[in-house]
Structures are given as C-alpha cells and as structure tokens.
Amino acid sequence: MTNNDYSIKKFTSKQLIITIAATALCGLIMVWASVIKYFVIGQPVNAGVWLCILTLALSFAVFLGGILLFAIVSRTFIIAHPKYYIAFMTVVTISFLAHLYLSILSPLMIAPGLTAMIIVQLSRQKQDALILNLMESVMVMWVLLLESIMTDGEVFMAIGGGNGTYMWLLAFITVINIGAGAAIPLVLKNKTRRINYIVLGGIIMLASEILYVLMSFIRPDSVTLLSYFWIVFVSGAIPLFAALVINPIMESAFNLVTDNRLAEWTDSRQPLLRRLATEAPGTYNHCLAVANFAEICATAIGEDPYLARAAAYYHDIGKLLNPSYFTENQSGYNPHDDILPEVSVEIIRKHSTDGYKLLKEYRLPEEIASVAIEHHGTSPIKVFYERAKGLTDGEVNIDDYRYHGRTPRSKISGIIMICDSSEAAIRAMDKPDGERVEKLLRAIIGDRIAQGQFDECKLSMLDLEVIRKTIISAFGGVFHQRVKYPGGEK
C-alpha cells in the first residue's frame, strides 16, 4: 500500500534537530555498549580504550548518518513526525545491542531479519524495514570485525584459533541477516494478518538452517560446524518472538499508526465508538457510510485505505458533546428552531475542534485526530448564514459563520471532506439518481476548490476527478433501492 503524503511532508528545523539529537543519542549508546563488550565482557582487546571509542564513534557517525540522510531525502514524513524516526532508531539500537551481546555465545546467534521483522509492522512504508535492517546488519558485522582485529586468539564457543572459522560464521550470518531483511518487506508488503508474519518467519528459519548445513560441507571443519546447527534454529526464532513483544510496546509508547492499531481503532468495541453508537446513533451510521466511501476513494488514488476508514470512523466524534443538535440524531424536534443562528452556528462548528480535543484525550494519533478538525476546513455553514441574513436588514459577515478548523493538510482529510459532504447530501435527496448525484458531486467539489479548501492537501485535479467517479460508482451500492415485498406498501 502507498501513502504519497508521507513522502512529501515538509519538516521544520525543530523537527530536524530532534531527529539529529535522537541519532546522536543512539550512536552514543551503541559506542558505550561496544566498549563495555570489548573491555568488560569479551576477550582482552589489545588497543587503548580511547582509540576504540574514537574508532567506534567515527564508524557509527557514518552508519547512522546514512540512516538520517536516507530519512531526509526519501522519508521526510518520519522527520516531520519525529515519533516515527525515534521509534525506528530505538528498534535499530535494541537490535544492535541484542546482536552485539548474543554474539558472545556465537556469531550464529545474530537473529536474521530481526530489525526488519519489527520495523515492517511499525512503518506504513515497508522499504524502511529493508534499509534499517541493512544498516543494522552492517553495523553489527563491522563492530564484531573490529573486535576480532583488536584481539589475539579470540575464542567463541571453542571456535577460533586463527583458522578463519569465526570470520566465516560472521560473514555467513550477516548475509543471511541482510537477505532476510530484504525478503520480509517484499513478501509482507500488502499483508496485514499476523499469521503471514509467522509463516514467513518459519520459512526464513528453515531456509537459514538448510543453507547453513549445505555451506558447512565446504569447510574442512564441517563436523564442528554442523554441531552448531541448533544455534541457527534458535536465532531464527528470535525475530518472531521479539516482534510479538516489542511491537505492541513501541506502538503504544510512541502512539504509532500501524496496521494492527488501525484494526484495533476500527473495532466497534472501542470506547469512543461505543459511545457514538449509543449516544449519537445517527452520527454513528453516518460515519460508517462515510468510511465505506473514504476507503474505496483512498484505494482509487493510491492512498492508505485502512487509515482512511479509521479516520472516517472518528471524524464526527465531536458531535458527542451535543448530539441532539445534529439532524441525523433528531426525531422530529429540532432545537435550532428555538435559538438564534449565531448560537446555532457556534454549536455546530465546535464539533470539529471538540472532536480533535476528544481524540487527543483518548490518545488517538495525530493522523486520525487531525481529520476531525480538518474535514470541514474553514468552509461556511450556509444554512445558518442564510437564516441570519433573513433575520436582519443589515450586512452579515460570512466569516462569522465559518468553521474554526483548518483546511485539510493530507489527502486523507481531503477525501473525507468530500465523502462527508457527499454522503449527507445524497442521503438528503428524495429520489437520488445517477445524473442528480453526479451534478451534486460536481457542485460540492467545485465549491470546495473555489474556497481553497484543497490547497494544502496536494489533491490534484485528477485525484478529485477519480474521487468523484468512485463515489458515483459506489453510490448505487450504498443507497440502492430495496425490493418491495408484498404487504410492505403503505
């Protein structure tokens, strides 16, 4: 799946400084972890500690600088949203530390694809898993290679003595690690079910075991190497179990948008959705209908359909504060008939800002909360504007009747703005048909364009045309005529 907004998002100097600081902190942790292993836990190192620190610092500056450069050039979204960058760097650091200290037992304990298995479930762009896994694999290999160079007669599980076996094992597991990191995002690109991760992890484990056994036969010490085949099996299982433990922690700690969390947020048992269904059932059904439109429209223009559905579920959550003032929740009596239009418009337009605050209070991420405050943009509430004009002979400032939100900043917000207005307008028609719906959609989209509502969300004219046609195609399936059964007529 793709989300083009994620790759073109601009970032500020403050956000860049935060990511640079996070990179430096991770590098510092890696340097000291390596020094501790060299001089405290590992074999004696025949080099000064400050020389080791300087060498490691320069090495990590190159590797981590490469990750930062990749993010700045190709993944500006994670710089603009530092929580993602910090989460990814945390995973890289954890994987590095795990591999560094597991290598004390054997280099074969380096778990193939560990970084990729975690990142692929945290990132909405699966290539992140490949790049970060590659860099982490190279860093581990380089640090262990430096350690080997600076030691004499280093022994790992009785393997060593200058016969090159350790280096062979390190090279073998590094290649497997990089290969697994490439296979994981490629195979799991459009997969969201957890069973897919388990199956792929099992395949990688089996493939690593087979390759290890086959490659061992070309070595003169094959008998010794084959006695360690079980280590490859154990290391292959580590990514699966580590991902099961680490992913939920990372998702919650950094409030990330992931496939798994989107599935959780669209569960009808979520507290806010339960409240919406109970306290504002009309709004709840409206949100479900908008979600259906938004999902297919997002798919049609290459955006994330799962994020579009989740955002649509919550876009009108602010109506919970005054549900009876919204038409879909009324059953005959309209309280706006008894109050001034100035009061009415204040109640109505607050649902966008109230919704944003409520979603942040419940710790939903910015990507979803922002849709609540953006789905009406700064457009005027014309029904109350016209009513106010009818009650006075003087001039009425239309700006006093606008929503206090902000114009959409993402394509998802733009999609939901169109789908929200379209669903409500089509449902209000007495006898909607294809021609009338098409005319209505052209008017809605044209009006939003004239108001400049899409200026900041990068929706192109082609995107808007595709969205319009998609809603028309879907309209028949959502608002289709029911068959009249005998006895059902009035």
Image (cartoon, rainbow, N blue to C red):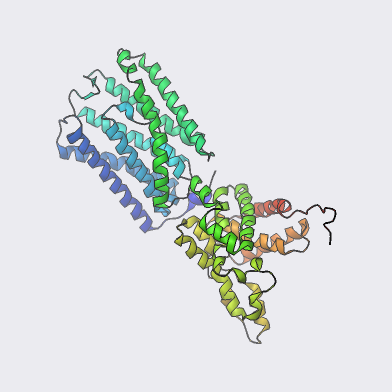
Q: Is residue 331 visible?
A: yes
Residue sitting at 78 percent across and 57 percent down? Answer: 433
Q: Is residue 432 above or below residue 180?
A: below
Report the front residue among 16 and 300: 300
Report the front residue among 435 and 225: 225
Q: Quadrant of the C terminus?
A: bottom right
Q: Is residue 309 above or below residue 408?
A: above
Residue sitting at 70 percent across and 71 percent down? Answer: 332
Report the front residue among 320 and 197: 320
Q: Position of residue 270 (x, y in %)?
A: 52, 54
Residue sitting at 66 percent across and 69 percent down? Answer: 330
Q: How many marks?
A: 0
Q: Position of residue 205 (x, y in %)?
A: 43, 27
Q: Is residue 303 visible?
A: no
Q: Position of residue 38 (x, y in %)?
A: 20, 34
Residue sitting at 56 percent across and 55 percent down? Answer: 412
Q: Residue furthest front?
A: 487
Q: Position of residue 325 (x, y in %)?
A: 61, 71
Q: Is residue 368 left or right of residue 219?
A: right
Q: Is residue 221 above or below residue 5?
A: above
Q: Is residue 430 left or right of residue 143?
A: right
Q: Quadrant of residue 336?
A: bottom right
Q: Quadrant of the N terminus?
A: top right
Q: Is residue 169 left or right of residue 239?
A: left
